[in-house]
Amino acid sequence: MVYLGTDLQSSNQVAMKLTHSKEDYQALEDEKDKYNALSGGVGIPHVMWFGQECEYFVLVHELLGPSLEDLFNYCDRKFSLKTVLLIADQAISRIQYIHSKGVLHRDIKPDNFLMGVGKKGNIIYTIDFGIAKEHWLAKQDSRYEKHPFCGTTRYASINNHNGREQSWMDDLESLGYVLIEFARGSLPWQGLKAATVEEKQELVKNMKISLPAEKLCDGLPDAFVKYINYTRSLGFEDKPDYAYLRRLFRRLFSSEGFKYDNIFDWTVKLFNEIHGPQKTEPVVPQTRGPKRGRRKTPSVRGIHKQRRQPKPKLPRSLNETHNPGSSDTAG
């Protein structure tokens, strides 16, 4: 559970992730260690405190804005190509930084990418390292077979489905499925019916294996096909060429004539809903809220002090409580 709190010394609002002392609080402490190892990187939340308070263990970090899943829903579950490419550029960089510190995320999905707030409102952050793992440990464990499934079914890599230990390429393959969903509106294996979670995972796995990248990315630019084929071709020890993957999307971005102005679909939609549709592309605030009587772009997520915040109605707020369930089996 994630709550909204206030730092009594600075009066700044913060995010507080709580785990009851009777539950597996070790996972929360491990997550704190991962944040510390990644500290200082762009798009990594700053951890302010970790410890026990009464019956709970608490991880406190800087407050962030809505997740990409929230914003995807706000934009009627379809992003423009420009927005997808802006997301891809930042997300690849985040994963590269996380990997450079010897950490595998292992649950890449839209819920785990959040926008910043204020002056950092255009920066994509990566969160929820509850099931992250050090690469050296994964290398040791790769000697064994039939590893339990780990992560989210919809975005899991084929290796993950097959019970193999995850490595660098698995995070990137999962990101590929996220980007395809953003661009197409859905993935082919969404909505499959099964009696059990295990049967659902098997159906999704079989569809992923049977679908070549060309068919999976049907109707999308060739850069998406090359991305999927590349990430699926890597072995456990192969270090990905992150620069190559970024170039694929940056060349497409340039060929489409887009501008690196950090104006995402949700920025335009909210602006138009407040001020009315514009005949030309509107000039909207990039990082700071509008002045005087205009309403600020909502960015607070979470729960207000000791109570769950009800799910908001967009667009009055782009906020939604993040429930970091790594066992999510979205299909």
Image: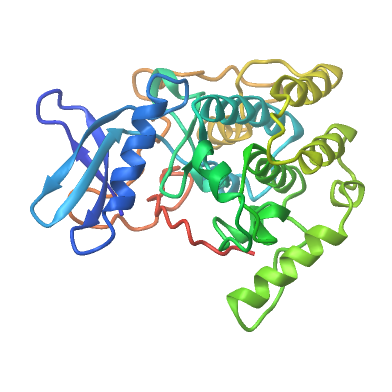
Q: Position of residue 113 (x, y in %)?
A: 51, 39
Left-right relation of 128 to 280: left
Left-right relation of 56 to 266: left
Q: Residue at x 47, y 56 (%)?
A: 326
Q: Position of residue 134 (x, y in %)?
A: 48, 38
State the scheme by which the image is colored. rainbow
| Nearer the observer, 168 or 47 | 168
Residue 280, image quadrant: top right
Quadrant showing the C terminus: bottom right
Residue 170, image quadrant: top right
Q: Residue at x 74, y 56 (%)?
A: 187
Q: Position of residue 316 (x, y in %)?
A: 42, 44
Question: Relative to 227, is 256 above or below?
Answer: above
How many numbered discs, if any? 0
Left-right relation of 39 to 110: left
Quadrant showing the N terminus: bottom left
Farthest residue, direction bottom: 195
Q: Position of residue 307 (x, y in %)?
A: 21, 57
Left-right relation of 171 to 9: right
Q: Residue at x 87, y 61 (%)?
A: 210
